[in-house]
């Protein structure tokens, strides 16, 4: 799970053009090892760690990258950088995905069969910028297949609608037909025989 950022990184600022350049002038001469650099440098270690887990089964276990805001951009970068990640769920994702920062030969091989879902709230602040961006850079239909999923489950200001907690609760209400949650997520050990359900209903 990749998480959002609290401040605009220099890499994000460079990717966002003029506005980003103005915001990053104070750190332009200082080398910054940002989150995008860290994911690119350590994704192999992350995947190797998952593959060493006792519940991992080669050929059966699917590695999925999930993130919110900056974490959504990092989740996409992780998939572009590693062929073992075959699916991405990016919630209210950053528009900076790191696509062009991955070696094209590796990236072009890694995206074959990759599926990404960019899930966002209708009125959140970056939804408008993403809409404009899609007019110039349309979503990819294949390799990777990128799907944009829009919900309208939160009301309030565009900034307030970026709340992951509120978005999560709104999605849960939508999935349950507005029925209240009857059991919290449980933290149980991995059961290889499938005897421990991942979703329980009472």
Image (cartoon, helix red, strand yellow):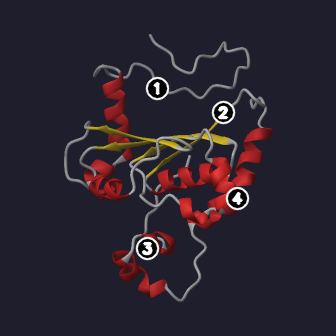
Task: Identify the residue under disc 2.
Answer: 62
Pointer 2 or 1: first along the chain = 2
> In the image, which disc is placed on residue 42?
4
Task: Identify the residue under disc 1.
Answer: 184
Which residue is at 38% across, 37% downward? Answer: 168
Q: Residue 144: x percent and y percent? A: 54, 44
Mark 2, mark 4: which one is toward the viewer? 2
Residues at marks 2 and 3, CA–CA distance in whole angstroms? 33 Å
Pointer 1 or 3: first along the chain = 3
Secondary element under disc 3, as helix, strand or loop, is helix
Which residue is at 34% across, 40% downward? Answer: 167
Residues at marks 3 and 4, CA–CA distance in whole angstroms? 22 Å
Pointer 2 or 4: first along the chain = 4
Q: Could you tell me which quadrant the C terminus lies in? A: top left
Residues at marks 2 and 1, CA–CA distance in whole angstroms? 24 Å
> In the image, which disc is placed on residue 13?
3
Q: Residue 19: x percent and y percent? A: 34, 76
Secondary element under disc 1, as helix, strand or loop, is loop
Q: Residue 32: x percent and y percent? A: 58, 77
Which residue is at 42% across, 58% downward? Answer: 95
Mark 2, mark 1: which one is toward the viewer? 2
Q: Are marks 2 and 4 in contact (CB under 8 Å)?
A: no
Mark 1, mark 4: which one is toward the viewer? 4
Which quadrant of the view contains residue 112? top right
């Amino acid at each position: 799970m990749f998480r959002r950022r609290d401040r605009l990184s220099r890499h994000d600022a460079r990717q966002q053009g003029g506005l980003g350049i103005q915001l990053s002038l104070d750190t332009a001469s200082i080398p910054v090892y940002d989150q995008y650099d860290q994911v690119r440098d350590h994704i192999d270690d992350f995947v190797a760690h998952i593959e060493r887990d006792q519940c991992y089964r080669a050929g059966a276990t699917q590695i999925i990258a999930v993130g919110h805001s900056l974490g959504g951009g990092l989740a996409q970068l992780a998939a572009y950088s590693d062929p073992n990640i075959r699916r991405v769920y990016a919630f209210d994702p950053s528009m900076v995905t790191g696509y062009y920062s991955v070696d094209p030969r590796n990236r072009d091989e890694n995206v074959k069969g990759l599926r990404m879902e960019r899930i966002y709230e209708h009125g959140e602040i970056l939804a408008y910028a993403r809409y404009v961006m899609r007019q110039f850079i349309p979503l990819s239909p294949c390799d990777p297949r990128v799907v944009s999923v829009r919900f309208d489950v939160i009301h309030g200001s565009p900034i307030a609608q970026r709340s992951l907690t509120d978005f999560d609760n709104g999605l849960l209400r939508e999935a349950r037909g507005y029925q209240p949650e009857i059991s919290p997520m449980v933290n149980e050990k991995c059961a290889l025989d499938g005897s421990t359900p991942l979703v329980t209903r009472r």
